[in-house]
Image: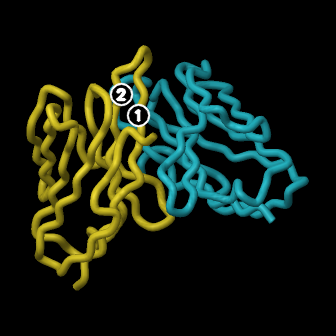
Chain colours: A cyan, B yellow
Amino acid sequence: ETGVTQTPRHLVMGMTNKKSLKCEQHLGHNAMYWYKQSAKKPLELMFVYSLEERVENNSVPSRFSPECPNSSHLFLHLHTLQPEDSALYLCASSQDVSSYEQYFGPGTRLTVT
Amino acid sequence: SQQGEEDPQALSIQEGENATMNCSYKTSINNLQWYRQNSGRGLVHLILIRSNEREKHSGRLRVTLDTSKKSSSLLITASRAADTASYFCAADMKTSYDKVIFGPGTSLSVIP
């Protein structure tokens, strides 16, 4: 257990569905991250939040919408996804954005049909 | 392009042997981190080496950093079957805001 939990662990959704991924960290960290990990591709940083403010957005399609209501919770809202969005979505947190190791959740395995 | 690039992409060794993985990066860094990932799970932080450090140990892990060559290596000594996993380096870039970029990873298989 790393202190970062993600739900659900597995999700299958159609292209017209709307769903949300949830991440919660119990470490008192100030920064949280969403990553996408596709087969045989490097980990892709999607969003970074520091103290509930978004500080990084790596040109992610608008069908992915993050929300950080407080420093312990991070959501990724999904709508009208494409099959190529199928991947492992990882949440991570760190003490602060700069120069600290990140603690990862177990991930949500997303399949878009 | 990726900041961190691991080499080799895949490595298969016998239990008890040492495993060495290399990482190269392109720009100045604050630190370099190594992570491990078991299949389909989240990444686990192994070790962080700062730009002013040259070598660091943690148990059976030894990490070196050569900032002149922009490279790092991770050595796992006396490997065990349980070390089978993917290993990633992550370069913490010196930019106007700190940013960590992960490499594509080395897949290590330790055969009992």
Image coords of residue A51 (percent x, y): 54, 19
Q: Quadrant of residue B38?
A: bottom left
User: What amino acid is at disc 1?
Assistant: Val
| Horizontal side of residue B61 vs A23, given as left or right | left
Which label's residue is closer to the chain start, 1 or 2?
Answer: 2
As drawn, B111 above or below B20: below
Q: Chain of mark 2?
A: B
Query: Mark 1–mark 2 contact, CB under 8 Å?
Result: yes
| Horizontal side of residue B92 vs A55, given as left or right | left
Q: How many marks?
A: 2
| Horizontal side of residue B108 vs A56, given as left or right | left
Mark 2 = which residue?
B93
Q: Nearer the viewer, residue A15 or A69?
A: A15
Q: Residue at x 55, y 48 (%)?
A: A90
Q: Nearer the viewer, residue A32 or A62?
A: A62
User: What amino acid is at disc 2?
Assistant: Met
Label 1: element kind:
strand
Q: Residue at x 22, y 53 (%)?
A: B22
Image coords of residue B34 (percent x, y): 29, 47
Q: Quadrant of the C terminus of chain B?
A: bottom left
Mark 1 = which residue?
B100
Mark 2 closeness class: few <14, some 14–19, many ≥20 residues within 10 Å: many
Q: Residue at x 14, y 32 (%)?
A: B68
In this view, the residue farthest toward the right is A16
| Horizontal side of residue A8 vs A24, given as left or right | right
